[in-house]
Amino acid sequence: QLQASGGGLVQAGGSLRLSCAASWRTFISYYIGWFRQAPGKEREFVARISWSGGSTGYADSVKFRFTVSRDNAKNTVYLQMNSLKPEDTAVYYCAATGPRRIITSQAMADGAYAYWGQGTQVTVSS
């Protein structure tokens, strides 16, 4: 129901755009989020976007470098990543909360997300 793509190898300072294609049932979720997991580390929140696209949120570590957006005509959510750093290296996952209302403060917790894609690897070389 969620398919992440667009990962790859990029040099520090470069850019990548990740895509998350969703089925209609998951695309109409209250929030769709991006998370990442680096080797040996716990999965962490990266960004989220509301169903309307009117509300977005970011982890402090990616704020002003990453932008989350959605194209409702294509049932796709994007994560534009600029000024990439080696510490951004991780497997990136998109996830959807489902249609139930989620309090904004809870939208950074992976427990709020019921549906998960398979992940796409992003590697940033120094």
Image: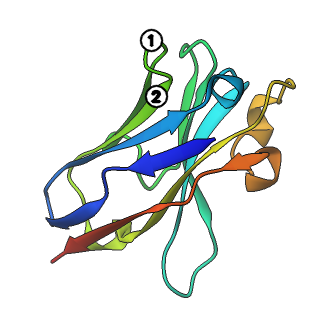
Quadrant, the N terminus: top right
Q: Element at badge 2?
A: strand
Image location (x, y in percent) of residue 29: 71, 26
Q: Is residue 89 above or below residue 72?
A: below
What x and y, as percent, mark residue 76? 46, 28
Q: Give the percent coordinates (x, y) of residue 50.
A: 62, 23
Q: Is residue 41 left or right of residue 101?
A: left
In the displayed structure, 35 sits above or below 121; it is: above
Residue picked out by circle 1: 73
Question: At which x and y percent is residue 96?
Answer: 68, 39
- Viewer-side residue, 78 vs 41: 78
Q: Is residue 11 left or right of residue 97?
A: left
Q: CA distance from mark 1 to mark 2?
A: 8 Å
Q: Which image quarter holds the C terminus?
A: bottom left
The type of residue carrying mark 1 is Ala
Residue assigned mark 2: 76
